[in-house]
Each structure stands twice: as structure tokens, then as C-alpha cells.
Image (spheres, helix red, strand yellow):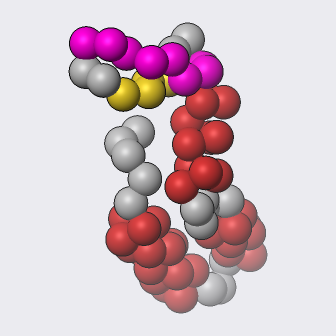
């Protein structure tokens, strides 16, 4: 996972919406993709919290001078 990008999240939402439009006849597919759409992070804080929950807590990396998820 890379850094949070509002443009990237918007693009993901657009792609999911197109899947929903193209597969409107299948309730199972619709349910799955609606859940994916609802789970998209809408803020950088949400995104970073998910990264930390998936990959561990953040720890300062002195060699590159930024916070990184740790396991």
C-alpha cells in the first residue's frame, strides 16, 4: 500500500461503480462490490489506520526520515 491519495481513492470508487453498473443483474456481485465501495477510506487518517492495522504500528524510520508501518 502506498501513501494516501484522494485521486486514487476516487478512481477506485469510479471503477467499483462501473462494476456495479455492468453487473446489476447479479445480487451476489452487487452485494460484494457495494461492500467494497462502502469500505473505501475517505480520509488519510482512515487509510493510515487501516495500513497500521494490516501491517502493524507505525515506527519512525531514521534512515528515510518518516513513519512506517512495522510488524
For image coordinates 45% across by 18% down, the residue present is 60
Q: Which residue is at the front of the view, 31 or 55?
A: 55
Q: Is residue 32 visible?
A: no
- In the current view of this chain or complex, which residue is farthest to the left? 64
Q: Position of residue 10 (x, y in %)?
A: 44, 74
Q: Does residue 45 appear left or right of residue 10 in this picture?
A: right
Dividing the picture into quarters, in which one does residue 39 lie?
bottom right
Q: Position of residue 68 (x, y in %)?
A: 44, 24
Residues rendered magenta in the picture? 56-63
Quarter of the C terminus within the rendering = top right
For image coordinates 30% across by 23% down, the residue present is 65
Quarter of the N terminus within the rendering = top left
Q: Is residue 46 visible?
A: yes
Please tell me how many numbered marks the rendered image carries: 0
- In magenta stretch: residue 59: yes
Q: Does residue 11 appear left or right of residue 50 in this picture?
A: left
Q: Is residue 64 above or below residue 7?
A: above
Q: Position of residue 33 (x, y in %)?
A: 62, 67
For image coordinates 37% across by 15% down, the residue present is 61
- In magenta stretch: residue 24: no
Q: Is residue 63 above or below residue 36?
A: above
For image coordinates 51% across by 17% down, the residue present is 59
Q: Which residue is at the front of the view, 11 or 53?
A: 53
Q: Is residue 68 above or below residue 6?
A: above
Dividing the picture into quarters, in which one does residue 43 lie?
bottom right
Q: Position of residue 70 (x, y in %)?
A: 51, 15
Q: Is residue 49 above or below residue 24?
A: above
Amino acid at each position: 500500500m502506498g501513501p494516501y491519495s484522494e485521486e486514487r481513492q476516487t478512481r477506485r470508487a469510479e471503477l467499483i461503480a462501473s462494476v456495479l453498473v455492468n453487473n446489476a443483474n447479479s445480487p451476489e456481485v452487487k452485494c460484494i462490490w457495494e461492500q467494497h465501495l462502502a469500505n473505501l477510506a475517505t480520509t488519510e487518517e482512515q487509510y493510515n489506520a487501516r495500513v497500521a492495522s494490516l501491517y502493524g504500528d507505525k515506527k519512525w524510520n531514521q534512515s528515510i526520515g518518516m513513519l512506517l508501518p512495522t510488524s
